[in-house]
């Protein structure tokens, strides 16, 4: 997953996906015209298809209910902006999981080292004269 995507990159990539799949000129999509004027019979099924294209391309699920939007983005600008917000949240979740995993691994390693030190200390105590059995 690319760490830094720009709005222009996202717009271009999504426009290319929509253009290829829906048969609409990429330049028209990038012009900012509403999807329902560019794509014949643009309905809820077409919205889902566009969403699935973007999800498949970028590798994570989009949830437009999680944005301040009332409906599916109307044009490439809205779609790219909504996508970028979710992409950034997705990356933050991945980084948080990675940090938690590293912290857990560090705790495990520290616990093993402490256990080893305790075992060595106990063995050293048993080696002292007068404590041997």
Image (spheres, grey):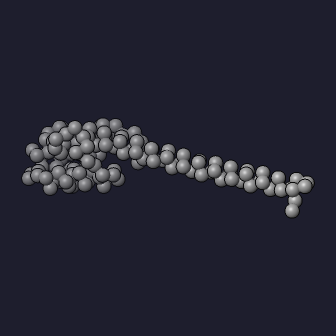
Compared across the picture, whether 6 is left or right of 28 comes to right
Q: Quadrant of residue 93?
A: top left
Q: Residue at x 78, y 54 (%)?
A: 122
Q: Residue at x 22, y 45 (%)?
A: 65
Q: Nearer the viewer, residue 37 or 68?
A: 68
Compared across the picture, whether 47 is left or right of 8 comes to left
Which quadrant is home to the C terminus?
bottom right
- Looking at the image, the residue that sits furthest to the right is 129
- In percent of width and height, residue 104 lies at 54, 49
Instruction: Count the numbered circles shown.
Output: 0
Question: Can residue 97 be seen in the rendering of this structure?
Answer: yes
- In percent of width and height, residue 108 lies at 60, 52
- In percent of width and height, residue 41 lies at 8, 53
- In percent of width and height, residue 115 lies at 68, 53
Q: Nearer the viewer, residue 100 or 53?
A: 100
Residue 65 position (above or below residue 52): above
Residue 24 position (above or below residue 75): below
Q: Residue at x 9, y 44 (%)?
A: 37
Q: Residue at x 64, y 48 (%)?
A: 110
């Amino acid at each position: 997953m690319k760490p830094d995507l720009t709005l222009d990159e996202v717009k271009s990539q999504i426009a290319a996906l929509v253009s290829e799949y829906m048969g609409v000129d990429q330049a028209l999509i990038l012009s900012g015209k509403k999807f329902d004027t560019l794509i014949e019979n643009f309905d809820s099924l077409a919205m889902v298809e566009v969403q699935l294209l973007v999800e498949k391309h970028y590798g994570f699920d989009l949830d437009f209910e999680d944005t301040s939007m009332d409906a599916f983005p109307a044009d490439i600008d809205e779609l790219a902006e909504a996508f970028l917000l979710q992409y950034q949240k997705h990356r933050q979740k991945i980084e948080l999981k990675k940090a938690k995993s590293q912290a857990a691994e560090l705790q495990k390693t520290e616990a093993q080292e402490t256990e080893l030190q305790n075992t060595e200390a106990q063995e050293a105590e048993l080696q002292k004269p007068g404590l041997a059995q």
